[in-house]
Image (cartoon, rainbow, N blue to C red):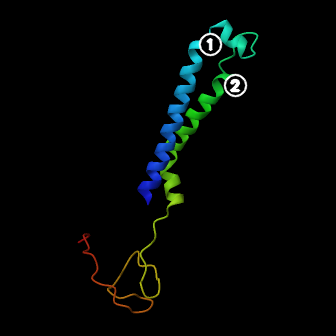
Amino acid sequence: MRWRVRVALRGVAVLLLVAAMVIAALRIPTYNKEAAWAAAGYARPPELTSWTWFGVPLAAAAMAVALLLLARFAIAVLVPVPKPGCPGCGYDLSNPTSERCPECGLVIGALPPNDSA
């Protein structure tokens, strides 16, 4: 499940980056042509910080980068990893101390070897 969420988040980020590049690639060649910006309703060339001209691709690229940077945190929030628990009572067995559950006494199985010795 975690890999599906990771692939989906990365796919959305890649689509946002591609969309930003396509929009920018379509707008940049017409930036210095008077007919193009006059037809868009500008009396002079739009500023680089203009939302309608360059802001949309910049916002899409920023969202894609943020999604890529926050993907690990988002996966941890969206798909929590369950803690190992006793099948009988659900007691948290993250740090088992014996082959039996300390809560209900159910035999869990052999403990993993301890490598600290």
Name the residue that disc number 2 marks. Answer: 52
- Disc 1 marks which amino acid? Tyr
Q: Label 2 neighbourhood size at 10 Å, few (<14), some (14-19), many (20+)?
A: few
Q: Residue furthest bottom?
A: 105
Q: Mark 1 sits on what residue?
A: 31
Residue 117 horizontal side relative to residue 7, left or right: left
The answer to which quarter of the image holds residue 84 is: bottom left
Q: Position of residue 10 (x, y in %)?
A: 46, 44
N-term mark: 1 or 2: 1
- The x and y percentages for residue 64 are 53, 38
Number of marks drawn: 2
Question: Is 92 situated left or right of 29 in this image?
Answer: left
Q: Nearer the viewer, residue 81 or 28?
A: 28
Q: Residue at x 50, y 38 (%)?
A: 15
Q: Residue at x 44, y 58 (%)?
A: 2
At a point 53% along the width and 21% down the height, the residue shown is 25
Quadrant for the N terminus, please.
Answer: bottom left
Which of the labelled discs sits on residue 105, or is there none?
none
- Check if mark 1's residue and mark 2's residue have beta carbons within 8 Å: no
Label 1 Cα neighbours within 10 Å, binned few <14 / some 14-19 / many ≥20: some
Q: Nearer the viewer, residue 105 or 49?
A: 49
